[in-house]
Image: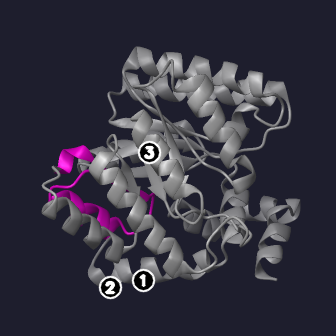
Amino acid sequence: MLRQAFLFLSNQQQLYNFATHNSLAKKFASRFVAGETLETALPAVAALNAKGITASLDLLGESVSTEAEARRTGQEYMEMLDRIHERRLDANVSVKLTAMGLDVSEDLCVNIMQGILDRARDYGTFVRLDMEGSPYTERTLRIFEDRLYPSYTQNVGIVLQSYLYRTQADTERANESKCRVRLCKGAYQEPATVAYPEKADVDANYVRCMHALLKSGNYPGLATHDEAIIAEAKRFVRENHIKSDRFEFQMLYGVRRDLQERLVREGYRMRVYVPFGTQWYPYLMRRLAERPANVAFMAVNVMREMVSGGR
């Protein structure tokens, strides 16, 4: 019921217009979204860099329906890479294939991605292919493995989600190919036929895959705000003599900033995903719709940060 409510709200133009012109709504959104333009996002990245934190920029928007939209988004990513390079920021970019026209044409999507990856290679930077809902998992991995990674082994990586049953096998495949993996739990509402319905099972699978990536992977990104899992990662690398420069922790913009800074002080690498764009209202609503528990998650983590003295 709550999921349907958020989805309904995400498509209401009147509420969209209200939210985008309401100072309170914008203030809440600014906690988790770095403004509506690249001009507002770049200073957010610079501020993170000043704290010893790297970043990955993500232009909000997905599932484009025309070639023109896909090519326009591709050009925006090229500009992002240009500006990151010009300002000498320590950042890469994160891309959803549906934003590059995957649902329009696979060949179109690959063509646009090749242009982005050519630019990234010129600058010696990196592009992460975000993972979307389970209907896109196999398509995304196939395009990555067959059409992109062979030509851009140093400049492109993938995301795997621990709530999917298949992810342990996908982790083994990724380690064999030596590609870079970002491991997250997953935020989409998935059926029990493809994903673990219980949090404890999702967490256990995360830890299994994390151990494999830390031991045999190529600079994995451990995307989690779960302090128990972070503690387990610390224990595992310590006991297996894995150096801190062989992996990085990753978190979302605006979530557990206190923990982000603490990990940096402890000598670990930290990357923060920085979303921006005019689609912040539907982005927030869809994210809450995917997993309504995110409402409580956000509230609890903001309160926890306030109590612990984070800003």
| Left or right: where 181 falls relative to 227 | right
- Where is residue 47? Give x, y as percent: 33, 48
Residue 255's place in the image compared with 156, above or below, is: below
Q: Mark 2 near mark 1, Cβ–Cβ under 8 Å?
A: yes
Which residue is depicted at the point 25% across and 51% down?
A: 269
Q: Callout 2: few (<14), some (14-19), or many (20+) C-alpha neighbours within 10 Å?
A: few
Q: In front: mark 2 or mark 3?
A: 3
The residue singled out by tag 2 in the image is 307
Residue 237's place in the image compared with 158, above or below, is: below
Query: Which segment did they paint magenta?
Result: 244-270
Q: Quadrant of the C terminus?
A: bottom left
- Where is residue 283? Give x, y as percent: 68, 57
The residue singled out by tag 1 in the image is 303
Q: How many marks?
A: 3
Residue closest to the eye, 272 or 196: 196
| Mark before the other along the chain sequence, 3 or 1 | 3
Residue closest to the eye, 247 or 200: 200
| Left or right: where 177 falls relative to 297 | left
Does the magenta run of residues contain 268? yes
Which residue is depicted at the point 71% across and 47% down?
A: 136
- Kind of residue at badge 2: Val
Residue closest to the eye, 49 or 110: 110
The residue singled out by tag 3 in the image is 181
Does the magenta run of residues contain 261? yes
In whole angstroms, how far apart are the C-alphas of marks 3 and 1? 31 Å
Which residue is depicted at the point 36% across and 21% down?
A: 124
| Left or right: where 4 falls relative to 23 | right
